[in-house]
Image (cartoon, grey):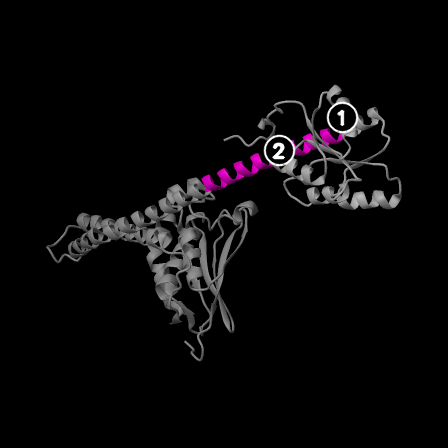
Amino acid sequence: MSTALNSTVVPANPGPPTVLVVDDEVENCEVLNLLLTAQGFRVVTAEDGAAALEAVAASPPDAILLDVMMPVLDGFETCRRLKTQPSTVFIPIILITALHSTKDRTRGAAAGADDFITKPFDGVELTTRLKSLLRLKSLHDQLEHQNRDLERRVAERTLDLQQALAELQELDRLKSQFISNVSHELRTPLMHAKTCVQLLADEALGTLTSDQLKSMQVAQTAIGELENIVADILDFSGSPGRALTLSAVALPGICRAAMEELAPFAARQHVAVRLALPPEMPLVLANRPALTRMLRHLLDNAVKFSPPESTVFISADVQPPQVRLSIQDFGSGIAPPQVGHIFDAFYQVDGAATRRANGLGIGLAVVKKLAEAQGIQIGVESQVDKGSRFYFDLQVAPQTRG
């Protein structure tokens, strides 16, 4: 659908411009008829104001030459009525009058007249002014036509966009439903596989060789990663704005749980993870599973972008009524233009590093979603080649100390 204004074609008039001559004197009508016909105009006449209004209502002319001094309905009132109607307000009206006073001209202007010609009039002057007004009327008509055409196109385009939006929303709903269903369906076979592998690893089903035990450990690690991926997908595709229940939790235990979960990956990357918390930590308000998953993702991200033999630190700064928890790495860092996008789904600062560490590219997006569900705001400070620090504030639980 093209929306270029220059593609709009205004239909040409089927014939010459029509001029309505209104005068109660037949001789004046005949003179104007001869003059205007000779100039290529089509002329219709009306003997008074009332007849003029009827003629305009039946077939609007392109312009009106209107005598002022007429019985019953004079030119001023006829002009006023025409100029107060939306359908006729833009028809050019020239008042032809023998009146010369400024008061009469002011009255005509107040009635909405577009021009004045004084009797006796000059034919050249009359036709020149008439043609000038008709040119303006033609431009106005073209503009009105283009506006109507543009409004039509906008309405059509708006309808198309509304339909497209509805289709996208339905596709998004179906996608979320599909992802949720698939994720739930994966959990059952994963649970069965995890149980069987655990039984084998514990040698409950028979003694294993050292190589078999190593294989079971690899399988357990892979199953754990699959469980995390399924959980990430469920978190990512879950309903936005879903608030989580908060309770008083101890940060040291949650930090250690996240570190323990990331320990195999950190070991493969040859990156150490250190916990540096004050000796006396207050309990904080959070959702334990969600906070643990946030820390796991943030640690995973920190380890992923850290060079071998470096250290990632988890630290806390207690400033009642808040505790600021930070995850600091000394890796490649994030360029300023990229900082604003790192919490976007599927955005990757360094695709090569991400591929080496695996993942779906939704880790930080999940962190943001879990944080918002707890009323937490995530902040980040980063310098290229110097590392990054992710941090967030947790409210101290009232009247509790750990």
Does residue 352 appear in this view? yes
The answer to whether 250 is drawn above or below residue 361 in the figure is: below
Q: Is residue 135 magenta?
A: yes
What residue would you read off at disc 2?
Answer: 59
Q: Amino acid at mark 2?
A: Ser
**Which span of residues is magenta-colored?**
132-161
Kindly tell me whether residue 358 is visible in this rendering: no
Amino acid of disc 1: Glu
Q: Position of residue 323 (x, y in %)?
A: 49, 69
Name above or below for residue 164 compared with residue 13.
below
Image location (x, y in percent) of residue 125: 83, 27
Is residue 56 shown left or right of residue 397? right
Cα–Cα span, label 1 and label 2: 21 Å
Name the residue at the left extreme: 206
The location of residue 79, given as percent across then percent down, is 73, 41
User: Depth check: 31 or 327 in front?
Assistant: 31
